[in-house]
Image (spheres, coloured by chain):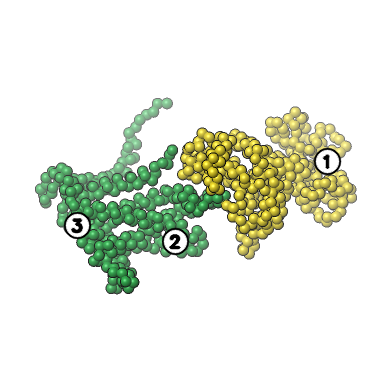
Amino acid sequence: MAEIHLKSLAHSYNRHAEKPEYAIREMDHVWHDGGAFALLGPSGCGKSTLLNIISGLLKPSDGEVLFNGVKVNDILPQDRNIAQVFQFPVVYDTMSVFDNLAFPLRNMGAGDAKIQSKVSEIAEILELTEVLKKKAANLTADEKQKVSMGRGLVRDDVSAILFDEPLTVIDPQLKWKLRRKLKQIHQKFKTTMVYVTHDQLEASTFADKIALMYQGQVVQFGTPRELFEQPNHTFVGYFIGSPGMNFLEVKRCEQGVCLGEKIFPLNELEKQALQMIDSNNLKVGIRPEFVHVWDDPDDSAYRAEVEFVEDLGTYKIVSLRLGEHLIKARLQEDQKVPKEHAFISFPEQWLMLYIDEFLVAKDDHNEEN
Amino acid sequence: MKKTKSNKAWFLVLPVFILVAFSAIVPLMTVVNYSIQDIFGATRYFVGVEWYREILNNSRLQDSLVRQFVFSGSVLLIEVPLGIAVALMMPKAGKWSVVTLLVLALPLLVPLNVVGTIWQIFGRADIGLFGWGLNALGMDYNYAANPMDAWFTVLLMDVWHWTSLIALLCYSGLRAIPDAYYQAASIDRASNWAVFRYIQLPKLKSVLLIGVLLRFMDSFMIYTEPFVLTGGGPGNSTTFLSQALTKMAVGQFDIGPAGAFSIIYFLIILLVSWLFYTAMTHGDSK
Ligand SMILES: Nc1ncnc2c1ncn2[C@@H]1O[C@H](COP(=O)(O)OP(=O)(O)OP(=O)(O)O)[C@@H](O)[C@H]1O
Ligand SMILES: [Mg+2]
């Protein structure tokens, strides 16, 4: 087991081209020892690239990869003692399921007794015991992927297990079950696990901490709750939650920031930041869950037109027009939906200020993020 | 719902049936017809399996058959492993892969009789580079006089001509293996041998099946190249089945025995191809 430290890491697939494009833009990141992490992000943001760099399948163009403080850049994947499971099942067709699962152990020179016990343990967990004698070529896609995962899980001494969207080909019901299994395995063996996905639900059910990646960089690393409540980049706000965070472009004004006539109050820290940074790219963001919707006028409420209502069973999404902005609000199923127009207000606590797309912290201890 | 049966659909199969009849069934039946009769000009007798008995007991043909199996066996044993090895060593991308592909494809484009002629001259001890070279190195090489040398030359010629086919088939098979397999193997700490044994070879199976069948059938029916190179000699040492057949049918005009011979020849090829096929696809389902 190991702590994995990515130091000033960057990677380009066409480094020698005239205009190299960077799949990983210079970043620093630490995966703490023994954690269950998710690496979340949209398609093409560099998740697989980052994973392949950690496992050694790719050599980064710049920066260092450290396992427990030791630089491993020049160490081959074979010798990094790391397991990786890919998006599509990879099985050794001509081998039986048992031999597939035993393969990494045999290559490490493990003894027969250990192979027996380890393989049957993992087969038990993944419910492969029935098919152990079957030839891998004749398995269903689901079973093949379980075998692929099993080959990663049989090695209990690995530095980390990396999963690259391993459940993509698996049908939803089994997906849910396997995710729980993975979580159990993590709790049992405490191996560092990094789980790549572009599904936020998958990320938050599996991981203690999520790294959200955007355009080749980890933009936020925190608990699912932190990502939800205090997204430190507009992209995080937009990507996490359904629907994503509302963002309103605002202007500087005497009391803080204004949307047309309306003034949004700011606290001291936010005011300071606004004075220090000379940028006019200002936004305020608020989660649809935190938008208050009233039937009657209220002191702090703005009048908005109801555009449409989506009923999603346990909750409703109301789209409201406020000037030129469309604001979404999430209502509980028993909450009354206003007709034609409504009064909305934004609780100060949940109203976030973004300068140049980055969050201005509301209190000091969040500064480090 | 009640199904109405109509036999009209058979008319749609008719064209294919006629085509197959003219391309395979009719000629084959003609040969069967010859093989069970004795024909002198206009008179003909029914002789039953007489010709078959004669052919099977003909010791010269038996020798040819053994020679043929040894030849096809050697061809497969040399060309298949060599072709795989060449495919494994070929560059995977870039301009060198194009160059190697072109060089490998070249022998395949040479007409059969030209291949024979090339080696006939190439191997001559007096003016051929190859034959002269071997002699200059102190070897007593003469394919026209020494049966061993003749065999060696015929085999070498076939290897030169056809190994590319196996190599190209395997190369395309290797390129079709997704990177993820190699990545998984390196994560699993597999050795190079294990990568070959458990990833590359299994994935090459279907192209190898085609390659082996093609090479077997082709080499088993080889005619032109040894005919041009050695004329079947010295003695009968490089007379293979098809040459023996041609001698009998065209040279001596023994149509009856030649017909029986053809049928047996055809059945052997069919049987051996079937054996290869079942052996190589066996164990796919378990
Ligand atoms: N082998 C490669 N050669 C060149 N460019 C590549 C290669 N692999 C990935 N890229 C590029 O690098 C960027 C990041 O790709 P990567 O596969 O890491 O994304 P991802 O986050 O894993 O996406 P997905 O969710 O679709 O798997 C993309 O722009 C992609 O086009
Ligand atoms: Mg990917």
> How far is disc 2 from disc 3 in space, using C-alphas?
39 Å
Q: Quadrant of residue A290?
A: top right
Q: Determine whether the residue tagged by mark 2 lies in a helix, strand or loop.
A: helix
Q: Determine whether the residue tagged by mark 3 lies in a helix, strand or loop.
A: helix
Among the chains, which one is yellow?
A: A
Q: Chain of mark 3?
A: B
Q: Is residue B203 visible?
A: no
Whether labels 1 and 2 belong to a single chain: the reply is: no
| Residue topped by disc 3 | B247
Q: Is residue B207 visible?
A: yes
Q: Residue at x 75, y 33 (%)?
A: A331
| Residue topped by disc 2 | B101
Q: Can you tell which of label 1 and label 3 is closer to the viewer?
A: 3
Q: Residue at x 33, y 62 (%)?
A: B156
| Residue topped by disc 1 | A349
**Amino acid marked by disc 1:** Gln
Q: Position of residue A316 (x, y in %)?
A: 72, 33
Disc 1: CA contacts within 10 A as few (<14), some (14-19) or many (>=20): few
**Amino acid marked by disc 3:** Lys
Disc 3: CA contacts within 10 A as few (<14), some (14-19) or many (>=20): some
Tell me if B240 is positioned left or right of A203 in this view. left
Q: Nearer the viewer, residue A258 or A348?
A: A348
Q: Nearer the viewer, residue B265 or A94?
A: A94
Disc 2: CA contacts within 10 A as few (<14), some (14-19) or many (>=20): some
Among the chains, which one is green?
A: B
Q: Chain of mark 2?
A: B
> How far is disc 1 from disc 3 in space, using C-alphas?
102 Å
Q: Nearer the viewer, residue A152 or A353?
A: A152
Q: Position of residue A353 (x, y in %)?
A: 81, 47
Q: Chain of mark 1?
A: A
Dot placed on the residue nearer the N-terminal end, 2 or 3:
2
